[in-house]
Amino acid sequence: MRTQVVIVGSGPSGLLLGQLLHKAGIDSIILEQKSKSYVLGRIRAGVLEQGAVGLIEEAGAGARMRREGLIHDGTEIAFRGERHRIDFKALTGKTVMVYGQTEVTHDLMDVREACGAPTVYEALDVAIHDVETDSPQVTWTKDGKPQQISCDYVAACDGYHGVGRQTIPADKLKTFERVYPFGWLGLLVDKPPLSDELVYTNHERGFALCSMRSLTRSRYYIQCSLDEHVEDWSDDRFWEELTRRLDKEAARRLQTGPSIEKSIAPLRSFVAEPLRHGRLFLAGDAGHIVPPTGAKGLNLAASDVAYLSRALIDFYKSKSSAGLDSYSQRALARIWKAERFSWWMTQMLHNFPESSGFDRKMQAAELDYLFASPAAQTALAENYVGLPY
Ligand code: APR
Ligand code: PHB
C-alpha cells in the first residue's frame, strides 16, 4: 500500500488536514486508534475563531456550523460579584462562533466519508518508521492483522498522548511545560444557557465558567482541586458550588437539571520544539497543550493545519519545500502567543492554592486595570478572537 500523506489521529487536526489535502487532490489515509463512536463521545471546548470557521468551510464541512453555530460579539468577566463585558466586535471588528468541537469532528467525518477518503478506526500499535529517509513507512494492527503503508510524509495529529511526538529522538526535541495546581470539573446539561454570552468568573472559592453548546444546551465548569473524583460530585453538589461562585443575579437565572456528562480535566501548558523531524510533522495537541481558559486548543490546531496543509499543497503543486521547511517556526510563533494568552487568562482568573497576599493583590489589580482600560480590553479581545495567520 502507498499514499501521499499518512495522518495519525482523527481528532479535529487530522480530519481538517485530511479534507484540505483532499480538496487539493492529495491522497491521505487516517489511522485512528479508537472507534468512531469513542472519538465522537469526547466532550471538548466550543469556541471557534474566524480563522478556524474559514478553514472548516474551506474543507467543505461548514454547512451545519453556519446554520447552528452561535455568533458571539463579546464575553463577560465577573469579579467581586460584578460582571464586566468585553466587546470583541467593538474593539476588534471580529466575533467568535460557539459550536462544539464534537460537532466539528462529526461534520468533518461526514464529509470525509462522503468523498470516500479512507479512515481506519481501531488501528492499534501504530508505529512510524524511516521518517529520516525519503520513504517513511507506517505500520499498525487491524483486527489482529499487521498492516503497512509507505508514504511521502507523516502528519502526527494524534494528540498529547500520541505516538508521533514519541517517535522523535529525545535529543532532537525540547519540551516546555507548566502544570497548574487545579483542574476543571465540567458539566453538560440540556437547559438554556445562563446568558447570551460566556461568563468567566474569578471567585475566592475558585474559577467558574458558564458556557454553552446551543440555545438549549449549556456547559458549566468549576475549578476543583487535583485530588477530586468526579464520583464525589453529585449534580446537586455541582449546582450548589457553581451557584455560590456566581453573582446574585446570575445565580437567580441559572437553570439547573440532570447532567448529560460530567468530567474533570487537569490544566497544563506544554510546547514541543521543533514540530518537524525529517518527514514527520506534529500538528495540534501532539505538539502543544494550552489550559482551556482562553478556548485556544482547537483554534491552535486549526492554525497548525492551515500552515501544514498549505506547505504540503505547495510541495505537491510546485515541488517547493520552502513551506515545509518553515512550518515548525511559523506554527510555533503563533503557538507561543496563544500559550501566553491562555496562561495569562488562567493566571488572572483562578484561585492558586499557594498564592500569597501579594499575588492576590496583583490579580485584583490586573482585573481592575482590565475593567477600566479600553487598551487592556482590546489586548484581551484581539487574542480571544484570534491572532492572524
Ligand atoms: N494511534 C492512532 N491514533 C491515536 C494514537 C495512536 N497511537 N494516539 C492518539 N490517537 C488519536 C486519539 O484517539 C484522538 O482521536 O489521535 C486523536 C487526537 O485527537 P485530539 O486529542 O482531539 O487532538 P487534535 O486533533 O490535535 O485536536 C486538538 O482537541 O484536545 C482538544 O483542546 C484540544 O481542542 C483541541 C483539539
Ligand atoms: C466550553 O464551552 O467548553 C469552553 C468555552 C470557553 C472556554 C473553555 C471551554 O474558555
Image (cartoon, rainbow, N blue to C red):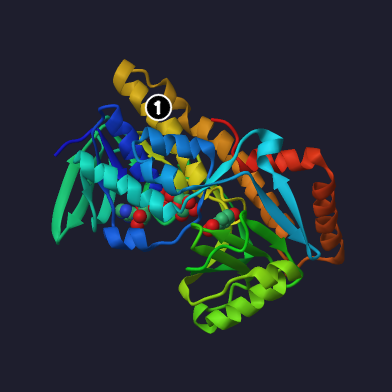
Quadrant in the picture for the C terminus: top right
Q: 185 left or right of 85? A: left
Figure quadrant of residue 256: bottom right
Q: What type is the residue that disc 1 sits on?
A: Arg
Q: Nearer the viewer, residue 119 or 66?
A: 66
- Up the image or down, 384 lies above or below 350; here it is above
Q: Position of residue 327 (x, y in %)?
A: 46, 30
Residue for badge 1: 310
Q: 287 left or right of 313? A: right
Q: Residue at x 33, y 45 (%)?
A: 108
Q: Position of residue 276 (x, y in %)?
A: 43, 36
Q: Position of residue 121 (x, y in %)?
A: 24, 55
Ligand 2 image-quadrant field: bottom right
Q: Secondary structure at mark 1?
A: helix
- Up the image or down, 105 lies above or below 94; here it is below
Q: 264 left or right of 340? A: left
- Label tally: 1
Quadrant in the picture for the N terminus: top left
Q: Residue at x 80, y 40 (%)?
A: 374
Figure quadrant of residue 383: top right
Q: Nearer the viewer, residue 370 or 351?
A: 370
- Up the image or down, 270 lies above or below 379; here it is below
On the question of residue 354 being in view, the answer is yes
Q: Nearer the viewer, residue 356 or 306?
A: 306
Q: Residue at x 65, y 77 (%)?
A: 241
On the question of residue 274 being in view, the answer is no
